[in-house]
């Protein structure tokens, strides 16, 4: 949720700095983020990473601005915009699976671009977390112990 909160704060700051009216339904968006994470995690298709969340914000903001322009009202960023982005993302992944036989995650695994199936580690900073479609954990950071230099 910290990544979502950071993007909400960042978006708020950007519009304030430009002195542009822009309303953000923070609680509604954070509720969507939690629900979306839980649904993706339960379906084991993999949760959105930081880049995907950033892209979702950019697209949702553009949708809010477009809708406001069409109605002549102040832009309001809400969970509805993220629902639209999530639906488009799912449909695009489905399209990739149908046309290519795999989605981006499957392709990364197949061509060894990225390894998403590593096991949970007891020394992981992140602790238990989201699982990918083949049962491995994702978004893991191992604990690193730094030693003072002797010199």
Image: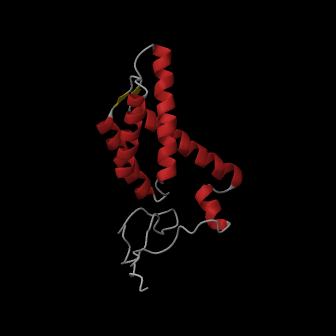
* Picture quadrant where residue 78 is located: top left
Hey, which residue is sitting farthest front in the picture? 151
Q: Residue at x 42, y 57 (%)?
A: 41
| Residue 79 appears in the picture as rendered | no
Q: Residue at x 44, y 37 (%)?
A: 83
Hey, which residue is sitting farthest left in the picture? 27
Residue 114 at x, y percent in the picture: 59, 66
Say if 68 sits above or below 83 in the image.
Answer: above
Scheme of colours in the image: secondary structure
> Looking at the rendering, in which quadrant would you find the C terminus?
bottom left
The one of 8 and 30 positioned closer to us in this rendering: 8
Residue 68 at x, y percent in the picture: 45, 20
Q: Residue at x 32, y 37 (%)?
A: 26
| Residue 146 appears in the picture as rendered | yes
Q: Is residue 95 left or right of residue 16?
A: right
Q: How many marks?
A: 0
Hey, which residue is sitting farthest top in the picture? 72
Hey, which residue is sitting farthest bottom in the picture? 150
Residue 48 at x, y percent in the picture: 47, 52
Say if 102 sits above or below 119 in the image.
Answer: above
Q: Is residue 144 left or right of residue 101?
A: left
Residue 9 at x, y percent in the picture: 36, 40
* Picture quadrant where residue 15 is located: top left
The one of 144 and 49 positioned closer to us in this rendering: 144
């Amino acid at each position: 949720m910290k990544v979502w909160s950071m993007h909400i704060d960042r978006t708020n700051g950007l519009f304030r700095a430009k002195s542009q009216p822009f309303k953000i339904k923070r609680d509604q968006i954070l509720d969507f983020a939690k629900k979306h994470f839980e649904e993706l995690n339960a379906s084991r298709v993999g949760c959105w990473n930081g880049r995907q969340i950033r892209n979702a914000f950019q697209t949702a903001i553009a949708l809010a601005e477009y809708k406001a322009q069409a109605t002549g009202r102040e832009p309001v960023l809400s969970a509805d915009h993220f629902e639209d982005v999530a639906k488009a993302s799912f449909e695009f992944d489905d399209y990739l699976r149908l046309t290519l036989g795999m989605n981006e995650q499957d392709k990364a695994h197949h061509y060894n671009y990225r390894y998403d199936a590593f096991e949970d580690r007891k020394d992981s900073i992140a602790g238990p977390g989201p699982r990918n479609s083949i049962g491995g954990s994702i978004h893991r950071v191992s604990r690193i112990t730094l030693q003072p230099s002797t010199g």
